[in-house]
């Protein structure tokens, strides 16, 4: 199975690539700076950015992916119609998926985006209202809507709790909107990477927005 990743140079994205390669997947990673990513057998690095649809098309044309993983972070740029960075690149990505017939996307979102906002604790709700986190969550929400509207595209929108570094640990599912969340759940990026890669080959999470954390 061949996977296209946007965000592969990031902290979670690089762990996703490691997991994919370990499990025998082949990968095309579209990155702004290929020299910042360690090369691996089975990993094809394409220089570019998902901001440019043509760069995604170029990556797909090199080798058609069976699935896509997005581990980007919201950035400050805005685009036509006031679209946020993350909505713009997500729209580009799903349009290219539709064009080439790639049918599954696993998207790294966040607990607190969309319906899951209701289940954040009062401190996190305050941070969403009063800090730049609110803009990032609004951007992720816009991207989530873009994905849900895409035709012929199956999605898993992964909503992890607060990210930490460290080893992969046992994961608990906190509901589609984080209904089962404790006061301050967290999860290691390595656990998130494993979850995202496992979701590729399983139908368990298709069409869902799993809020996940490590067992506390
Ligand atoms: N922090 C938390 O507690 C938390 C909790 C839940 C969910 N999340 C979500 O997790 C994600 C962050 O994961 P992470 O920590 O692994 O991210 P990260 O290490 O900051 O990686 C971000 C990736 O996005 C790319 N990127 C950033 N700005 C870009 C731009 N303008 N154009 C093209 N590419 C760009 C980076 O590419 P370059 O290497 O080229 O810069 C990198 O590959 C975010 O979506 C965040 O909302 C975070």
Image (cartoon, rainbow, N blue to C red):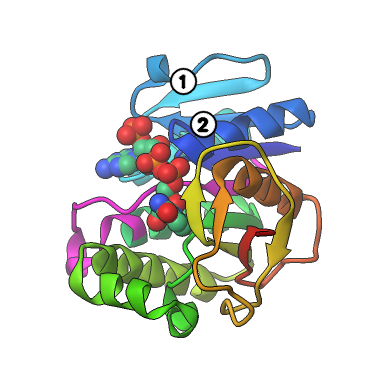
Q: Is residue 195 left or right of residue 78?
A: right
Please rate how many residues cluster around mark 1, counting C-alpha atoms within 10 Å: few if below 14, some from 14 to 19, many from 20: some
**Marked residue nearer the N-terminal end (1 or 2):** 2
Residue in the picture at 46% in, 35% down: 11
| SS at circle 2 | strand
The quadrant where residue 199 appears = bottom right
Residue in the picture at 46% in, 20% down: 37
* Dominant secondary-structure state across the stretch colored magenta: loop
Residue in the picture at 39% in, 19% down: 36
Dividing the image into four equal quarters, which quarter contains ligand 1?
Answer: top left
Whether residue 89 can be seen here: yes
Please rate how many residues cluster around mark 2, counting C-alpha atoms within 10 Å: few if below 14, some from 14 to 19, many from 20: many
How far from the left and from the top, in percent, is residue 38? 51, 16
Which region shows up in magenta?
A: 64-86
| SS at circle 1 | loop
Whether residue 95 can be seen here: no
The disc label shown at residue 29, or none:
2
Q: Is residue 23 left or right of residue 136?
A: right
The disc label shown at residue 37, or none:
1
Where 10 sits versus 213, above or below?
A: above
Please say whether residue 72 is one of the residues in the magenta stretch.
yes
How far from the left and from the top, in percent, is residue 47? 39, 24
How far from the left and from the top, in percent, is residue 173? 70, 68
């Amino acid at each position: 199975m061949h996977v296209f990743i946007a965000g592969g140079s990031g902290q979670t994205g690089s762990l996703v690539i490691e997991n994919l390669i370990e499990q025998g997947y082949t990968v095309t990673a579209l990155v702004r700076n290929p020299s910042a990513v360690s090369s691996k057998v089975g990993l094809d690095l394409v220089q570019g950015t998902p901001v440019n649809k043509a760069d995604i098309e170029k990556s797909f044309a090199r080798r058609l992916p069976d699935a896509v993983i997005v581990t980007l972070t919201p950035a400050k740029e805005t685009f036509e119609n006031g679209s946020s960075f993350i909505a713009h690149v997500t729209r580009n990505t799903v349009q290219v998926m539709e064009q080439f017939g790639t049918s599954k996307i696993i998207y790294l979102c966040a607990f607190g985006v969309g319906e899951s906002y209701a289940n954040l604790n009062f401190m996190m709700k305050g941070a969403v209202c009063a800090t730049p986190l609110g803009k990032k969550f609004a951007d992720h929400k816009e991207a989530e809507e873009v994905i849900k509207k895409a035709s012929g595209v199956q999605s898993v929108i992964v909503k992890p709790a607060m990210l930490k570094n460290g080893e992969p640990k046992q994961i608990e599912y906190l509901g589609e909107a984080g209904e089962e969340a404790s006061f301050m759940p967290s999860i290691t990026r390595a656990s998130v990477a494993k979850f995202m890669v496992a979701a590729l080959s399983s139908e368990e999470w298709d069409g869902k927005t799993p809020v996940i954390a490590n067992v506390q």
